[in-house]
Image (cartoon, grey):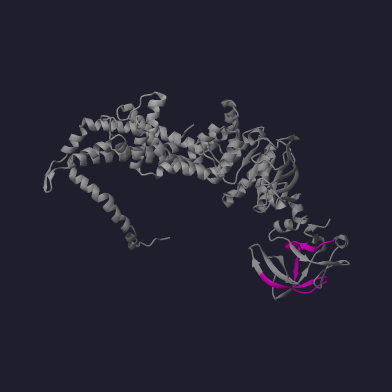
Amino acid sequence: MARIELNEVAHSYLRKPKNDLDYALKRIHNVWDDGAACALLGPSGCGKTTLLNIVSGLLTPSRGRVLYDGKVVTELPPEKRNIAQVFQFPVLYDTMSVFNNLAFPLRNRGLSEIKIKERVLEVAEILDLTPFLNKRAEGLAADAKQKISLGRGLVRSDVAAILFDEPLTVIDPQMKWYLRRKLKEIHEELKLTFIYVTHDQVEALTFADQVAVMFEGEIVQIGSPQDLFENPEHKFVGYFIGSPGMNFLECTIEGNEARVDGAGIVLDEETAAKGRKAGGKLELGIRPMYLEVHEGSGDGMVKARVKGVEDLGSYRIMALTLAGQTLKARLSEDQPVSGDEVWLAFPPQWIRLFADGRLIR
Amino acid sequence: MEKWPNNRAWFLVLPAFVIVIFSAIIPLMTVINYSVQDIFGPGQAVFVGLEWFQEMLADKRLHGALWRQFLFSGLVLLIEMPLGILIALAMPKKGWGVPVCLITIALPLLIPWNTIGTIWMIFTRPDIGLFGAGMNNLMGIPFDHTDNWLDAWITVMLMEVWHWTPLVVLLAYAGLRAIPEAYYQAARIDGASAWATFLYIQLPKMRGVLTIAFLLRFMDSFLIYAEPFVLTGGGPGNSTTFLSIYLVKIALLQFDLGPGGAFSLIYFVIVLLFSFIFYQALQRIGKGEKV
């Protein structure tokens, strides 16, 4: 168990990186507390796996330092770091039984067979693998295989952290749900540091207490799932988290109103004041679920054209045009929709202002 | 879903079937036909039943050739398989070294077989060959593959290993390259030694290609003809007379078509039988519980 610290880490796969674009990771400065369940969330190619491999030691960063419990481990190979990693595809020693798979990391470290047996049985119990111990690992289902990969990390009682690299990619939907819960249980039971990489926001938000959102080689925001949803610090977070993502409208501030091409949207005192001070390109952001759609006009409402409605089962998504920009609103199942034009209300407490893509604080 | 039977699809198999008839089935039938007759000349043949088979199975010279053949194939597999894997492991994984190594190693495979025999015959000649003359004159070790049976065997083995280990290397290298990087990463994280990584990751993952390499090398070495025929002609004495060389002697030089046919069929059955046994055994090694 350990507290993992990344100190000004940057990485480029090129030998002589020329500019920022050559870096897969631009500048990461971050601390994961001991025993935390953290997720790294981001689209494919944003540097999540690179970052994970730097933490585990499979990669040495071009710049910066990695610290475990305050000790510098930047140059240490993974076998000396005492870390475990679960990969996207189950990695097993096919010719071995499940027992021997679990025992393998311990045997490599020269533990006595008695201790190995004790430890393996313990871990197999936690992972519900006991009935399979004598089976060959090769023929098992994907979820059992991923549990074995995880088990190879758990058997080492002194493991510093367990890293997951999109571990549920090859798992069936129902088993995904079960494994996610299992992971959470194990985390609560063992209080190990878990770092979980994924591009699936549902996975990240349900698994982790703390989610770091990555975008183009940078961590753009770290926070609780609720924080990321309500106060995205970067346009990308607003857009990436939530389904569909946050709406953004280009606007200017006049008094207490945000003007969007002639229409005025009322802001609260504080937001408007901050908006007036900020420079750069201003945008107004609001989550589709907070945008209210009305059939008749009302105080402070704005008229918008309906482009279409998409039924997603338990709710519907309405696409709208307002001053040439597209908006999405989430409608409950029973809300009637008719006509080409509706009136939108923007509840001031859910409006966020962004300047040049960043939240105005 | 129900499948519609479409018997016209059989026409697609027809070309392959016709080729197999002319390349395998008709020749085999001819051989079977020869093997049960005593042929004196065109149109003069007597049916003799299984007599040729009995005669060939009791032939001392065939026994000798058979044991030599087993010894030869055994040595070939024993040397070429580990050596091929070793070279494949030592080859670079990326960069300019890969094409250089691959082409250099594959060169012997591109040379016609009888040319290989000629190359080695000259290479090992005790009077003018680089190797033969070098051994005799520079090292002071008497070496003459035309006179000494051990020297002949050493020469044939060297030639065989030089010629065919590249095939094992190429197959093993392909197998190694197909192993996803995550396996090596997991092994590092699990603290596995290089030997453990080889034993539990590389070897099991190479099983498929190594099975193919093993069977190909067994069959080809068991059927070897052109190279030793050119190099030693089966001598000195009978020391390098392998099955195929003996067979050609009977069937084409003495023109004993009956015994030759019987011999061919026995030869064919042996190769088929051993290939089958090896294949089954190799499949089982992969599936059996190994601790």
In the image, residue A306 lies in the stretch drawn in magenta: yes
- Is A20 placed left or right of B147 in the picture? right
Q: Which quarter of the rendering shows the C terminus of chain A?
A: bottom right
Q: Residue at x 39, y 31 (%)?
A: B131
Which residues, given as a range, are shown in magenta? Answer: A279-308
Quadrant housing residue B256: top left
Q: Can residue B164 be seen in this view?
A: yes
Instruction: Give percent across and percent down for residue B36.
Output: 16, 42
Which is more toward the observer, A199 or B253? B253
Which is more toward the observer, B149 or A333? B149
In the image, residue A77 lies in the stretch drawn in magenta: no
Instruction: Give percent across and percent down for residue B8.
Output: 33, 63
- Seen in the picture, residue B80 relative to A243 is either above or below; the reply is above
- Seen in the picture, residue B232 relative to A208 is either above or below; the reply is above
- Is A335 placed left or right of B237 in the picture? right
- Seen in the picture, residue A246 relative to A30 is either above or below; the reply is below
